[in-house]
Amino acid sequence: MPEGHTIHRLALDHRDRFGGRVVRASSPQGKFSDSAALLDGRVLEDVEAHGKHLFLGFGDTGWVHIHLGLFGKVAFGARPAPPPTDTVRLRLVGESAYMDLRGPTACALVTDGEKRAVQERLGADPLRASSSADDAWPRVSRSRTTVATLLMDQKVVSGVGNVYRAEVLFRHGIDPYRAGRDLARAEWDAVWTDLVALMREGVRNNRIDTVRPEHEPEAMGRPPRKDDHGGEVYVYRRANLPCLVCGTPVRTAQLAARNLFWCPVCQAA
């Protein structure tokens, strides 16, 4: 599932290609046809990302709420657009570009109130200027739940996924099984500040990189990581490989139905 930096990058991409301009909208798949007809010929007035949710604003017509989920994909291209396949849920065509949305968990035309209701259920987003460490701290500091689980709870912190959760805990030497209430406020502030920086970098580069300069391939004389997700990481998907810092094999386990990765030495209990 795409993490928050991908959704914020998609928001920028939509704004750059279609913002403030009339778009043609269609639903070749047919599941969004009625709503697409209402949007067709309207101006894309606003674009907003919150966690893993993307909102495309069409003024009084409403907002297109998109959640990609596990299988959703967005593809951009230059005009002229090729004939769409019947898997395209939503196609937008602008003056010089088009966008195809396939396989989202959610694609719905919603009102301002419905949009607010979605956002009110979401936690603090490190990529939103209106969010801060203070917003999530009350829930984190009172919780017996593991910090690794809390970071993935979209009602606590919105936009953080499996990669960022594993990497930020490693970077701060925090045992993923520690309870939220056992974190010091200074530790939480440091984690939040790091998430803001890492995820902003993810938006800029459209990939996740979390290793510090001294642990990059060139500095360590090691080959670059090869993975569909791209980017250099410390522990994510590196189970049984040596930790880049101490050499201990990286461990993995299931936690809240997701694979957890950590170094038992660098993140000792």
Image: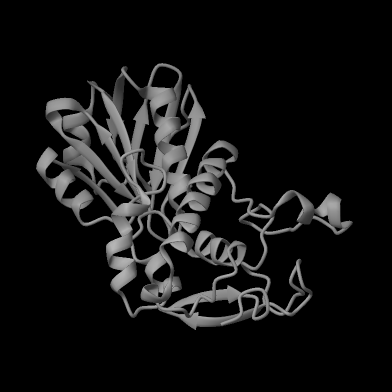
Q: Residue furthest right?
A: 221
Q: Is residue 118 left or right of residue 206?
A: left
Q: Residue at x 67, y 76 (%)?
A: 239
User: Foreground: 196 or 44?
Assistant: 196
Residue 49 in picture, x, y percent from top left: 34, 41
Which quarter of the figure has residue 122?
A: bottom left
User: Foreground: 195 or 142?
Assistant: 142
Quadrant that contains the C terminus: bottom right
Q: Is residue 169 left or right of residue 25?
A: right
- Judge whether residue 161 can be spotted in this image: no
Q: Residue at x 23, y 21 (%)?
A: 41
Residue 104 in picture, x, y percent from top left: 35, 53
- Judge whether residue 72 can be spotted in this image: yes
Q: Is residue 219 left or right of residue 12?
A: right
Q: Is residue 118 above or below residue 254?
A: above
User: Foreground: 154 or 176?
Assistant: 176
Q: Residue at x 78, y 53 (%)?
A: 214
Quadrant that contains the N terminus: bottom left
